[in-house]
Image (cartoon, grey):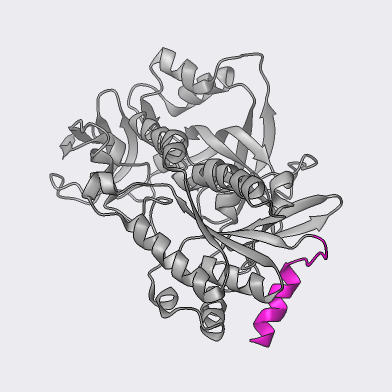
Amino acid sequence: MASVYRKLIGSISLPTHARRVVVGMSGGVDSSVTAAVLKELGYDVTGVFMKNWDEREETGDCPAARDAEDCSTICKALNIPFYQVDFVKRYWNDVFLSMLNDYENGFTPNPDVACNQHIKFDAFFKHARSKYQCDYVATGHYARCSYQNGYFRLLSGIDPNKDQSYFLAGLPHEILKQTLFPLGNLTKPEVYQLARDLRLPSKVLTRKESMGVCFVGKRRFPQFLSQYLDDRPGDVINASTGKVLGTHSGAYKYTIGQNPRLGSVPTKQYVVGKDMKTSTLYTSSNANDQRLFATQLLLGDVRWTRPDVQANQSTFARIRHRAKLVPVRLHTNTNDVTTTAAAAATACGFATITGYHPEISSLLRFQHALKHAATSYIADFNDPVKAAVAGQYVVLYQGEECVGRGRILAVNYCN
């Protein structure tokens, strides 16, 4: 265990005057080990469980209550205080409704990024700092922080299979300086080893990892969305021939590049475009159809980790979680408009279209978005990127530092 501890100590500063920390608890191995090692390292630790989703309304069952009970058991074993906080309304309004609106309008959102922005590192962070007067908030994310030239910086976790810096991108210096990520210097097997060495309750080791949408959990997602959005059946059309191949139950259930299960379509197809107004999917039998690739993206809601970041030649981008890092050139999209690209696209009927369309080209829609998007950036790629889609996030790196992110507003596909 000594070698693992050396890694931990190298990733956590130990100030003599600031030692009180609140750990966001989930009942899983990551948050449990986070709380345990911080206590071992001399911190005054408090565990707090966030309730963000009320599944009782769907099923009559309440997994959140079981999760809270697990957290209470773990905190008792560690002999640390345990509390709960309810953010169900905040999550519904700031994360879930926004996600539904995106799907309804043809976007493919990333609610995990929104959850970190609005819940974990806003609502929960402020609650922990004010109610418990803590010096730090800690989570079980696989990421790291470092201090250099007057700013705290977000670094990727050393375990490439678990690195979660993508989901934390855009957290500002002011948040990072009061946040601890104790697991960032560890691999997942080392975390499990620590759980055994620290004699954490056995349920920590046997509990399945949380998957799926942040706090909602793993679901059959199309069916889950159908509980909140109206299904609108439509045609599946071959983008090359214009032939109707079959039907689907709702275009919002599919995204660009996806190989969907379409019971009425006998051959394997890949989504290259969709029109939400007519509820039409355009597909190709070629997994590498040129219509899936793009060399330009328009980014909005761009957030930098620190104010002195320069988007230069050494900047790399990840267009989705675990996607390959690729070189990117960023430059500001300057115009004098006050509206948004989404509002302008809606006014012209472009907002219902994603990817390929037989009548309105991707280039025309992209140029229109450029003219009407306030405070945005253009991301240029030398090598085309595959299946970039509006609503997702482009996360920016310089070396191992995650310097910022932007939400994709429009994509200039090669069609």
Residue 212 or residue 410, whichever sits in front: 212
- Quadrant where the image shows the N terminus: bottom right
Pinpoint residue 263: horizontal percent, then vertical percent: 14, 48
Residue 242 or residue 261, whichever sits in front: 261
Q: Is residue 161 visible?
A: no
Asked if residue 303 lies in the magenta stretch, the reply is no
Residue at figure coordinates x 64%, y 44% from the top left: 170
- Rendered view: 85 above or below 356: below
Residue numbers of the magenta segment: 1-17
In this rendering, position of residue 150 left or right of residue 330: right
- Rendered view: 78 above or below 215: below
Pinpoint residue 279: horizontal percent, then vertical percent: 25, 29
Asked if residue 14 lies in the magenta stretch, the reply is yes
Residue at figure coordinates x 55%, y 51% from the top left: 167
Q: Is residue 393 visible?
A: yes
Residue 337 or residue 74, whichever sits in front: 74
Residue 97: name its quadrant.
top left
Residue at figure coordinates x 80%, y 49% from the top left: 151
Pinpoint residue 3: horizontal percent, then vertical percent: 68, 85
In this rendering, position of residue 223 left or right of residue 180: left
- Quadrant where the image shows the C terminus: top left
Q: How many marks?
A: 0
